[in-house]
Image: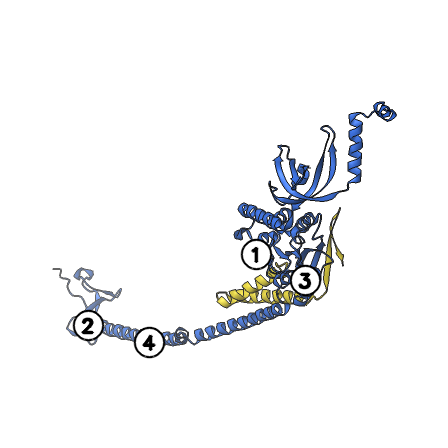
Chain colours: A yellow, B blue
């Protein structure tokens, strides 16, 4: 899947739904878009359900950046 | 007399340099780094970049120098007549034998002066285009990592973390702790913003602190912070103090939040809403796909039942019929031809019959054969007297002997 971030996934999902609603796709395209859309939505739901508490501290070291748990 | 003598006879003679060094030592060790308040006068910016001026009040004045490396960090432009607070130490300039105040840091004294400096910097940055609306970066709709530049101990960070976790549980919050007031705060804030840009893995930055006095919030009015916000590739939300205060960083930032809490509310959508939106999209996807298939099915159906489709079998029947007709016609024509031919044939046979010897014989002709070889005699000279002949008549035959041959 091309999307890397939740934001991109949401945008793509939105775009796909709009495309489908315009109804100018062939059957193959519709099915492909449907598959893609479902995958994107699964991805988004997974992201949303990651409920791990995350507060970290940005620390610059000689080797670059580190995240330290606070 | 003795007293005078003892004064006249020196026990220890100081050189000028020696004395000056003693004075220097005395002044520089007994007077610590201190804040002095006064009004600027005789301000001169030397071409070397060093700033020379006097601080004066009603009764006295103090020579001051602010070296280039230090005056570059000034957030306001000092002017004659401006009342300032200067932090520094007394030093002695040995060569000329006078003392001066070596200024480390300087800020306008009092609210009025601060306000003036604020307006000055605001105008300057505005003219440079740092507040331009068209240069403001859009904020991400769904940030997954949020960088925060603030104090690790204040209420602001707690409020933000609480709100972020309420609105979007699981969101990643990365804090770069900084001093938000006092000596070096502005520099720390600016370098924290730069570091986040170097780090690169956050979607948006919140830079701010809770409310305080104008002096407390001052770091966010400093040019170095404004420039760091302006050059940030990551969108920046400025969240300084309470609602009524505007800071320079508010003007430069891509979005101004009135408080840190408000920034946390603005920066992420409500997770429940987003969840709902994703579920809605899913529903629409399924619905659309189902609708599409249904509509295609209907289209197919309507095609199948459409006139041309229904006509197809009809056409076949029509061709069948036409074929039958043609076959029939062909048959009729063939029969006709056959009849015609047979008629012709009978005509011909009639004529043939007419031409047959019998019919000729009937008319009174006869055929004469030479007996010896059974040849039909067509010329008199074929025969000789005494030759036997046979003559075929219409009915019956006669035999005879040639008496005489007569040639024409």
Q: Which residue is mark 3?
A: B160
Is B307 rendered above or below residue A60?
below
Helix, strand or loop at label 3? It is helix
Q: Which residue is mark 2?
A: B354
Helix, strand or loop at label 4? It is helix
User: Of residues B218 and B61, which is closer to you in this image?
Assistant: B61
| Visible residue check, residue B66 | no
Labels 2 and 3: the sequence-earlier one: 3
Closer to viewer: mark 3 or mark 1? 3
Labels 1 and 2: the sequence-earlier one: 1
Closer to viewer: mark 1 or mark 2? 1
Q: Residue at x 62, y 38 (%)?
A: B41
Tag 2 and tag 3 share a subunit: yes
Q: CA distance from mark 4 to mark 1?
A: 80 Å
- Horizontal side of B17 relative to B73 (left or right) equals right
| Visible residue check, residue A47 | yes
> Few, some or many C-alpha atoms within 10 Å of disc 2 (few <14, some 14-19, many ≥20)?
few
Helix, strand or loop at label 1? It is loop
> Few, some or many C-alpha atoms within 10 Å of disc 3 (few <14, some 14-19, many ≥20)?
many
Q: CA distance from mark 4 to mark 3?
A: 93 Å
| Chain containing mark 1 | B
Labels 4 and 3: the sequence-earlier one: 3
Determine the image quadrant of residue B156.
Answer: bottom right
Is B348 rendered above or below residue B198?
below
Q: Which residue is mark 1?
A: B138
Residue B134 picture location, percent across and down: 52, 52
Labels 4 and 1: the sequence-earlier one: 1
Q: CA distance from mark 4 to mark 2?
A: 43 Å
Determine the image quadrant of residue B42.
Answer: top right
- Indicate the quadrant containing the C terminus of chain B: top left, top right, bottom left or bottom right: bottom left
């Amino acid at each position: 899947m091309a999307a890397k971030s939740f934001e991109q996934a949401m945008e793509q999902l939105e775009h796909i739904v709009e495309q489908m609603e315009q109804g100018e796709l062939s059957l193959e395209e519709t099915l492909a878009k449907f598959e893609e859309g479902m995958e994107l939505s699964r991805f988004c739901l997974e992201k949303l359900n990651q409920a791990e508490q995350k507060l970290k501290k940005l620390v610059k070291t000689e080797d670059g950046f580190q995240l330290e748990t606070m | 007399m003795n007293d005078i003598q003892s004064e006249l006879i020196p026990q220890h003679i100081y050189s000028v340099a020696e004395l000056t060094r003693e004075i220097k030592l005395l002044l520089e060790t007994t007077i610590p780094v201190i804040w002095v308040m006064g009004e600027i006068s005789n301000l001169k910016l030397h071409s070397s970049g060093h700033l020379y001026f006097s601080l004066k009040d009603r009764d006295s004045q103090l020579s001051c120098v602010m070296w280039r490396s230090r005056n570059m960090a000034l957030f306001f432009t000092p002017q004659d007549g401006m009342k300032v607070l200067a932090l520094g130490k007394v030093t002695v300039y040995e060569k000329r034998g006078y003392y001066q105040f070596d200024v480390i840091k300087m800020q306008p004294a009092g609210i009025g002066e601060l306000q003036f400096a604020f307006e000055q910097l605001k105008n300057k940055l505005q003219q440079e285009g740092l507040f331009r609306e068209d240069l403001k970066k859009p904020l991400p709709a769904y940030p997954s990592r949020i960088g925060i530049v603030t104090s690790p101990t204040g209420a602001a960070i707690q409020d933000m973390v609480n709100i972020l976790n309420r609105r979007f549980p699981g969101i990643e919050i990365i804090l770069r702790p900084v001093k938000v007031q006092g000596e070096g705060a502005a520099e720390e804030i600016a370098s924290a913003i730069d570091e986040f840009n170097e780090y690169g893995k956050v979607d948006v930055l919140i830079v701010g602190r809770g409310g305080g006095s104008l002096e407390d919030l001052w770091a966010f009015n400093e040019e170095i912070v404004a420039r760091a916000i302006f050059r940030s590739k990551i969108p920046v939300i400025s969240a300084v103090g309470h609602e009524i205060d505007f800071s320079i960083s508010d003007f430069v930032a891509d979005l101004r939040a009135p408080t840190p809490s408000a920034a946390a509310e603005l920066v992420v959508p409500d997770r429940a809403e987003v969840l709902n939106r994703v579920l809605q999209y899913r529903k629409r996807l399924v619905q659309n796909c189902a609708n599409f298939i249904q509509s295609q099915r209907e289209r197919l159906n309507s095609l199948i039942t459409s006139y041309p489709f229904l006509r197809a079998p009809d056409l076949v029947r029509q061709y069948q019929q036409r074929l039958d007709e043609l076959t029939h016609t062909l048959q009729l024509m063939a029969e006709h031809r056959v009849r015609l031919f047979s008629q012709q044939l009978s005509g011909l046979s009639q004529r043939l019959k007419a031409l047959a010897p019998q019919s000729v014989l009937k008319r009174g002709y006869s055929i004469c054969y030479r007996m010896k070889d059974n040849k039909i005699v067509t010329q008199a000279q074929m025969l000789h007297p005494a030759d036997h002949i046979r003559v075929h008549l219409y009915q019956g035959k006669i035999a005879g002997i040639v008496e005489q041959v007569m040639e024409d």
